[in-house]
Amino acid sequence: MVPEQPVHTVASEQHRNFAGLRSPGEIIFGSGQRHALAQVVQRLGSRAFLCVDPHIAGSPELDALTDGLRGAGITSGVYADVVPELPTANVMAAVTEARAHDADVVVAVGGGSSIDLAKVVSCLLAHGGEPADYYGEFGVPGPVLPLVAVPTTAGTGSEVTPVAVLTDSERRLKVGISSPYLIPTVAICDPELTITCPPAVTAASGVDALSHCIEALTAVRREPTATLMGERVFIGRGRLTDQLALAGASSIISGLHRAHAVPEDIRAREEVMYGSMLGGLAFGTAGTAAAHALQYPIGAATKTPHGVGIGLLLPYVMEYNRGACIPEFAQLAQILGAEDAEEETRARRAPGLVQSYVRKLGIPVSLKEIGFDDERIDWAAEQGLKSVRLAENNPVPLTVDGARRILQAAAHGDAQADKTSKEIAV
Ligand SMILES: NC(=O)c1ccc[n+]([C@@H]2O[C@H](COP(=O)([O-])OP(=O)(O)OC[C@H]3O[C@@H](n4cnc5c(N)ncnc54)[C@H](O)[C@@H]3O)[C@@H](O)[C@H]2O)c1
Ligand SMILES: [Fe+2]
């Protein structure tokens, strides 16, 4: 694929020095930190509604958390029927139970689907209505119920982000509710909770996290006007998000192959969860771009997990963006083991290195492998462009024609996996 022409190669000093960040009021990270939950919730309410992933429902782990809450004088209602990728039909059932419990604080213990459910429940408890009332950016009119997020996957970064992603059951499409009010009040990230993730979940969620770092690092750089933060939830890249994205990519890359191969390796799990949290902070302000825009229709059509579609598409999107991201791609290639002296050479290798890296985790490299029919490429390109805010965040303008070319390359697996990379130690 011939890369598009760069549009943002030269940035003024003022552009480069701009920094913005939105984040939870408190982040607690570390093995064993889940036991801080009761102390944290006690500050926020006395009737907790827990949205928990089915894998943890009825487990001694969950019992220990609810016992801790009880010991702190907090009652808990537990909703454990979270469906992956969060169909909207799932949300109203949870809201009904939360109302019956008269909840004044919401807690999520689970993957991105559980955390996103908790975000929407907190919103509906505070403001009423149904999820569709809040689709898009800045649609949430004010603060939601206090929310504590405890992730059990290392991937989405949802514990620190302002967005909830749902699958609209009627339109069969992914939809987002984006608002600074949805950022959890407190994020408690305990890597020990990810030990039970089977390799397929570790791979899909870890690759999603890596893509957050890469898409945030290479997001468009906007004119830093004094109204920028108020006009957009996802504002494009800045100094703080660049630092977080690079550090996040480095942590994830150092730990993900090992966490996938040896699930109980806590040091590897810590690296991946730390990186996914940094990735969440980075993209929670900078935003993601074309890979996420195109994954929405691909995921809806093939029912593949979010991270699988993202990992498949990312190298092709990187190839499309390469001309606008030479220094950033060179840095990423270096993290992935490229030792070439020339920046251009390292940058050219980045898409292939990323593809080799995710391929070793079992991520497919062509749309064919996930059963996506070539004849639907035009449809998917048009649908992808409907995620206007994501498309606008791409460093190279994403046109329908550009989206079509990315998908055509992905259809047949046309990015060359770079097999010359240094092996990442497992
Ligand atoms: N809000 C955000 O910022 C954001 C960002 C990216 C993606 N997302 C969304 O998040 C969802 C994906 O979340 P996810 O990747 O965390 O997966 P998930 O929450 O959908 O869970 C995937 C599977 O893993 C299981 N699981 C979760 N934790 C486990 C554990 N510790 N041990 C064993 N099994 C476990 C679940 O039961 C489920 O079967 C998608 O809907 C995606 O669109 C949200
Ligand atoms: Fe994602």
Image (spheres, grey):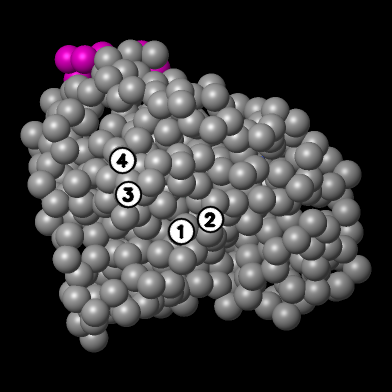
The magenta segment:
370-376
Image location of residue 77, percent across then percent down: 72, 56
87 or 425: nearer the eye? 425
Asked if the magenta segment contains residue 103, the reply would be no
Quadrant holding the C terminus: top right
Evaluate if marks 3 and 4 touch, with contact meaning CB atoms under 8 Å apart. yes
Number of residues whose C-alpha sits closer than 10 Å to that of mark 2, classed few (under 14), some (14–19) or many (20 or more): many
Residue that carries the numbered disc 3 in the rendered image = 343
Vertical relation: 358 (above or below) 34: above
Gap in angstroms between the C-alphas marked 1 and 3: 19 Å
Gap in angstroms between the C-alphas marked 3 and 4: 5 Å
Indicate the quadrant where residue 425 lies.
top right
Evaluate if marks 2 and 1 touch, with contact meaning CB atoms under 8 Å apart. yes
Image location of residue 264, percent across then percent down: 80, 37
**Label 2 is placed on what type of residue?**
Gly
Residue that carries the numbered disc 2 in the rendered image = 248
Number of residues whose C-alpha sits closer than 10 Å to that of mark 4, classed few (under 14), some (14–19) or many (20 or more): some
Vertical relation: 41 (above or below) 6: below
Q: Residue furthest bottom?
A: 226
Gap in angstroms between the C-alphas marked 4 and 2: 23 Å
Residue that carries the numbered disc 4 in the rendered image = 345
Gap in angstroms between the C-alphas marked 1 and 4: 22 Å
